Image (cartoon, rainbow, N blue to C red):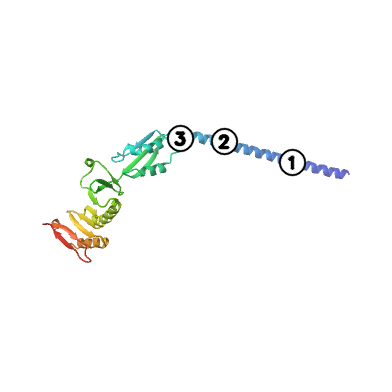
Amino acid sequence: MAIFSKERSKKNRRRGAFSYRSNLYKEKSKRKIIKKVILLIALSVAFFFLFSLLNQSITKIQYITEMKRVSPDDLRGISTKIYDEGFLQINLSHIKEEIEQVNWVKSVSLERRWPDQINILIEEEDIIGWWNKDSIINSKGNLFSLDQQSLPGGLIEFYGPDGQQALVYEKYLLFAEELTTRGILIEKVTLDFKGSWVVTIRPNIALRLGKENISERFDRFLMIWDESLLDNLAVIEYIDLRYTEGFSVKKRN
């Protein structure tokens, strides 16, 4: 009985020692968790304070370049949105997309200037020419009304049925790509109501391309030009390319 009692006492002591170590480990774990929680709270408070310090309300908008065609009224609604945002919080990509939808805006870049300013650089669309002598067409092929006195001279003239300005402008780009490399300047592009194309080049020479096979006929003119088959351009009124093969030249009276 005495031996059994001693063994039992040893087991109880071992259990007690294990229980003490287990409780001590649990206590240390709790302390570590509490320290981590306190550290996390402290970091969150510090981050919030720093973010609040840096994310000041925007009070200044600086346009870097002088705008000739984009007016302050066009940007007023967007400016209001910018003033409602914080310095770090504002989404410059969204603002950029909105400004790019404004008439006459070709490209936009924005940058933050701490503590409360946004700089905006706007590149405006170029004026390409007249559309039916009563509207202006820009480098996106869009139409606008402008004061004629504010327009530069020597603008290209585009003519065509109402609503066809995009098609005429697209054709102009294709023609101009080939002609400008040869030093040939376009004065006028015309699409009549029957669907016939006429491209007028300097010095006031009309290329009559007709309604069909426009690309082939235009390439034929380029071949004629490249092989120097045209003499004394100043006296030519038009070049008729509406033949299956060949061409004809009409001289001025």
Q: Toward which corner of the image does residue 151 lie, by quadrant?
A: top left
Per the image, label 2 sits on a secondary structure element best described as helix
Task: Look at 29% across and 54% down and name the residue there.
Answer: 167
**Tag of residue 19:** 1
Q: Residues within 10 Å of mark 3 (few under 14, many from 20)?
A: some
Task: Look at 60% across and 37% down and name the residue there.
Answer: 37
| Res 148 visible | yes
Q: Which of disc 3 and disc 1 is earlier in sequence? A: 1
Residue type highlighted by circle 1: Ser
Q: Position of residue 148 (x, y in %)?
A: 22, 42
Residue type highlighted by circle 3: Leu
**Tag of residue 167:** none
Residue located beneath label 2 in the image: 41
Query: Distance between the Cα atoms at labels 1 and 2?
Result: 33 Å
- Vertical relation: 100 (above or below) 201: above
Task: Look at 81% across and 43% down and name the residue there.
Answer: 10
Q: Nearer the viewer, residue 119 or 191?
A: 191
Left or right: where 240 falls relative to 70: left
Query: Distance between the Cα atoms at labels 1 and 3?
Result: 52 Å
- Vertical relation: 111 (above or below) 178: above
Residue located beneath label 3 in the image: 54
Left or right: where 22 falls relative to 72: right
Residue at the far right: name it. Answer: 1
